[in-house]
Amino acid sequence: MLNLYASLFLLCCLALSTSLAKAEEAVRVMTFNIRYGTAPDGDDCWPHRKNLVLEVISDFEPHLLGLQEALRGQLDEIAVAFPQYVAIGVGREADGNGEYSSILYDRRRFDLLEGETFWLSDTPNKRGSHNWGNELPRICTWARLVDRTTGKILHVLNTHWDHQSQSARVGSGRLIAEYIAKLPPEEPVILMGDFNVGPANEARQPFAVLGLRESYLVLHPEGQNIGTFNGFQGTTSGEKIDAVFVNDRWEVLEADIVRTQRDGRYPSDHFPVTATLEVK
């Protein structure tokens, strides 16, 4: 009987050890359109909601954080609050200013191998370029990282598509899909961002052709009230335009839409979207 108890104890310890190891290997990802800091939003302007944005980030503690609409000053304030993050990317304008689609990675978890920004246009290497019907430049930032916990190399992309031009969104989807298709097939890929269209829009279909899965819909395929643009009102009835896509090298452990608010005030006009992932 003593041997039986000892065996059961050892099995429990082994199961706990395996569970803890898997938890350590899991990668927490957040995509968050934080609304540009100079927007004339009255009571919802950046100084009034900055602390709530920081709180939302702190609560989830993402290893990888994709920000959209971030201005340089906002990135600087986030860097002060979270010194563990290293930011990759440049502003979308020709001079490197304007809105960023930055990737922030936790330096305690990842090391950077390479990373850049390209423009969603016929001339992706030309700063500030836009020629698909969009009035403003649109960008995608990418990073190739090595996971210090697992030794795995992964590729991360963050983008913000146009809010008006469907032809620009279609071109953006095609260009990003072409970029991903050229990556080593064994490499885990994460694509996140504000796509400004829902899952059924044709601009997102090239991702399905590549086998990319929208992490939230993997776990919640029949999800209701999953709109992510809230207009500072907490609205949930629209389309899910903010997303974290993954290729088949990832298992989706958890996925959520973060609807944090304080006294009816929201951190942004978009809800952050999170995913907890593990390399298969």
Image: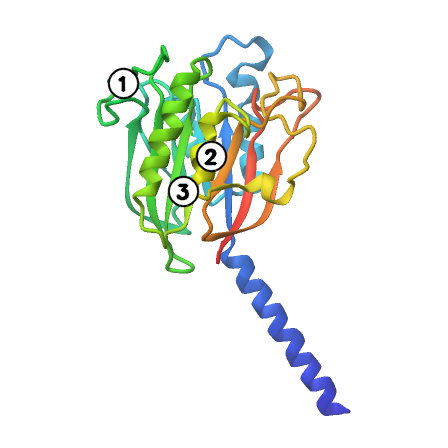
Residue at image mark 3: 105
Dot in front, 2 or 3: 3
Residue in the foreground of this view, choosing between 80 and 192? 192
* Vertical side of 19 occupied by 260: above or below: above
Which residue type does callout 1 highlight? Gly
Q: Nearer the viewer, residue 74 or 91?
A: 91
Q: Position of residue 120 (x, y in %)?
A: 32, 24
Image x and y of residue 278, in percent = 50, 54
Q: Is residue 78 above or below residue 13?
A: above
Residue 135, by quadrant, is top left
Pointer 3: residues within 10 angstroms few (<14), some, or many (20+)? many
Report how far apart the C-alphas of labels 3 and 1 lie in the structure: 25 Å
Kind of residue at disc 3? Tyr
Q: Which residue is mark 1?
A: 128
Numbered tag placed on residue 95 in the rendering: none
Vertical comparison of 178 with 133: above or below: below
Residue that numbered label 2 is attached to: 81
Say what secondary structure mark 2 lies in: helix
The residue lying at 35 percent from left, 40 percent from top is 180
Q: Quadrant of residue 169?
A: top left
